[in-house]
Amino acid sequence: MGEIVSPNEKPKFVIKSDKPSKNSLKLSELLTRRRKELDLSLEDIERNTRIGKKYLKLLEAGEYSNLPNDVYTRGYVKNYADFLGFDTKEIIKLYSKERHEYDSGKGLKSKNNYKLGLKPIGSQSYTITPKTILFALTSVFVLIMVGYVSWQFSQLSAPPIIRLANQDKSSTSASFVILSGEVDSGSDVFINDSPILSAPDGSFSDRVMLVNGNNQIKISARNKFGKESSKTIIVESTSEGIDKVVSTDVSKNKIEGVEISIEAGKQAIYINVKTDGLEVFKGTMLPGSKQLFKGKESIKLSTGNAGSTSVIMTNSLVAAKNIGTLGPEGEPKQDIIFNKDTNIQ
């Protein structure tokens, strides 16, 4: 039976034979029998070895399938056997033999899958299965998709970016300037709040008619979410000398063909003009700017804002006829035709 060396120290029991024989019992049976011989409960063993009671039960039941991996279980066996007074070297040999038999085919495969896990001493086990791997991969995929959608939404909901090829301030002796640049694709482009055409990729190029002196030109962009950004440039026009040579007024007397003088009112206007079937101008006129167009047979005019587009016409029937604005403020007008024989009373 053995005896306790000291009640205040870890119990150490001495047995007559330390080596299990070839015909000895299984490890689980040896441990259980020895504990009962010493009249010790599992609680006594747990308290003195600090091995969890559930692991002690598994050892005594020989349930290797539910025990931690070999490294941790080997430590449990050694501590338990040492406390019970066994020769731990022989006990470990017996454990290694039984564990090898189990791992070789009796218990390594479960009915459904392989289970891999580590069970630290005194802690819960964590088992990795195909189901948990699938759940983890699905979670990662969902997080990536949520992050991507959030990034896309933040990009679309942010104000569009405007990149201009023109300088912030410049001067020219011409009566017009070419504004070019690009904005975020899908955004609408405006010059002084008048819409202009842009390519699907967001690039644009527009001819802007100037007035003498400083011209303040605002380029703005608005995306589908209503977010807007703008940039302003200053262009100084010194075209007064040219205007004296190239008049912007129609002839005072009747002519064989047709002439129209277009003036932008309080708002900038985007116009397209064709004379005798050929496009001669497409661009923006700033408030107060004027342009003269001449044709042999006809002039066709489209404007983005009829209420800010004033026309004076001369042809074979009328001379310097003030037609006035072409419609209500903000209303676009397409393909208004002025012929050489148009008679406007």
Image (spheres, rainbow, N blue to C red):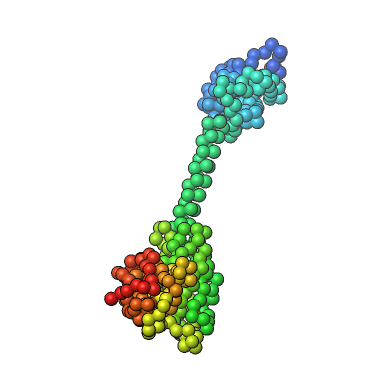
Q: Where does residue 232 sit, x and y in percent of width and height?
A: 46, 74
Of 234 and 142, nearer the camera is: 234
Residue 216 seen in the current view: no
Which residue occupies 46% across, 64% down? Answer: 197
Using the image, determine if residue 216 lies above or below residue 221.
Answer: below
Residue pictured at 48% horizontal, 76% vertical: 233
- Of 339 and 57, nearer the camera is 339
- Residue drawn where x is 56% and y is 23% of the image: 112
Image side of residue 338 versus residue 162, left or right:
left
Specify the quadrant that holds the C terminus: bottom left
Residue 98 drawn at (x, y percent): 66, 19
Give coordinates of residue 68: x percent, y percent: 59, 29
Q: Which is more toward the observer, 180 or 276? A: 276
Q: Quadrant of residue 298?
A: bottom left
Q: Quick check: 284 above or below 251?
A: above
Report if residue 323 is visible in the image.
yes
